[in-house]
Image (cartoon, grey):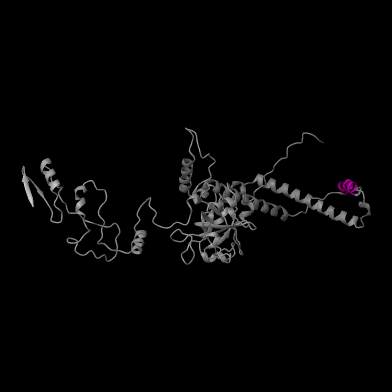
Amino acid sequence: MAWFEGGKRARFFAAERKRDKLVDKLRRQNLNYPTIQPRGYYSDIITKDAQLGNVQEGGADTHYNTLWQAQTEKKIPAALDFKASTSEVEDHLKTQVFGPHTGIFIAKDFATQAFEPKVQLPNFHNPGEKPRKIELERLRRLYARLDLPTLLVERGVRTDLIMPKQHLNLNIILMMNPADPAPFPPYLPLSIFDNTEFDCRTPREWLKLGDMTKARHPIPSLCLLPTKDEDGDKDPTDPSIEYDWYDAGVLDYDVATSLYFVQRVDENCRIVNPKGEMVVNGSKDPVTGKRIIYKNQFWIDRWRVMFRAEDPRIFADRVAFAYHGRRMCEAQLRYTLYVDCMPTDGLGNLSDKNFEQIRLWAHSTPGLSKFKKLKEATEKVEKEITLDYCRVMNQFILDKAVQDDPATFAFVTLPIKQEKPAPKFGE
């Protein structure tokens, strides 16, 4: 059906019901129906072996009674002819994420609050002051951009030398590297030198970040773990074990040993058991209460756990403090060994005149004269004093030799002498 007016033509569809009032309105306003343009329907998800059929005859169902609003409609009609199962679509969605995005396409096992830094700001602020939520978001983004291995390198910490290892046939070549003239491998555990003052939360507060309505979720962290899960059963000082920083989730904390129970994330960044279920409540069985330990779970010290909610710069300072403190301590132990191994011949001994006054003061102690083995005990003490005297003289000789020729004795680290302040009162 068609009519002509002023050289213009209006066309009606067979599927459309006749609308007399609309036709009269079009005639009065000299308007036409919008021109129908062919449309194609496509899917952003490419599925395998999709049976489209005859796309010219098929297609989605069109509601002709809404055709008049097609130019202002923001949603396209539903493509009902493209059938696909929900599981198939979800599988293809996981593999078709390209570039940065804001959508959540995979399941997450970490609570949002577990990424929030600790901020000491009030919940309500006055105009002109920094809002608490803004500061939380700024710090969260800042912490996410910082790279811990890079921060450790800037502070002179080598990840491959953090963990001490056993060396059966140790052969050290001194003075080969001017930057490190004494390349002795570490042998003391770093936990001895860990400073807990760097921590901004207590262990209970860290675990509280994972508390949800029904269970305690893992807390996101970056941990120093073995590169292979099979190495978890070996001695941590085994030379065959290699360590590196990996994303993990903190599950629990042991108060008796001060160790954290962590689990390495899988390829989907999830903390799950072999059945694919999320590990909650410290990997404990809900019925028996016993802990179920898998091969990718480890008990580690606090300095090996960097929570995502803490400042990576402060954590790097913590590791560097313990790392350099251990190096200094081991250097002092070697210095003490050097002094003890020096010969004592020709250094001279204390004469009897030196011991005469010492014996007089020692034997004048009330009740000491009744001691039967007083003479034998006195001789032992005199030998210890003589040995200490020789050791001090050797220490003076070694210090002078190192100070006179520091290039030759670069592998020797002299102890830092801290002079005691002079007392204000007394003799």
Q: Residue furthest top?
A: 128
Q: Residue furthest right?
A: 370
What is the x, y in percent for residue 313? Answer: 53, 46
Q: Is residue 408 visible?
A: no
Residue 248 as seen in the image, left or right of residue 186: left
Q: Nearer the viewer, residue 357 or 408?
A: 357
What is the x, y in percent for residue 306? Answer: 53, 52
- Examine the image and state in which quarter residue 425 appears: top right
Q: Is residue 367 visible?
A: yes
Residue 416 as seen in the image, left or right of residue 295: right
Q: Residue at x 79, y 53 (%)?
A: 387
Q: Nearer the viewer, residue 235 or 89?
A: 89
Q: Residue at x 14, y 46 (%)?
A: 21
- Examine the image and state in which quarter residue 89 appears: bottom left
Q: Nearer the viewer, residue 19 or 58?
A: 19
Which of the image's four quarters has the C terminus?
Answer: top right
Q: Main structural element of the magenta stretch: helix, strand or loop?
A: helix
Residue 231 as seen in the image, left or right of residue 386: left
Residue 76 as seen in the image, left or right of residue 268: left
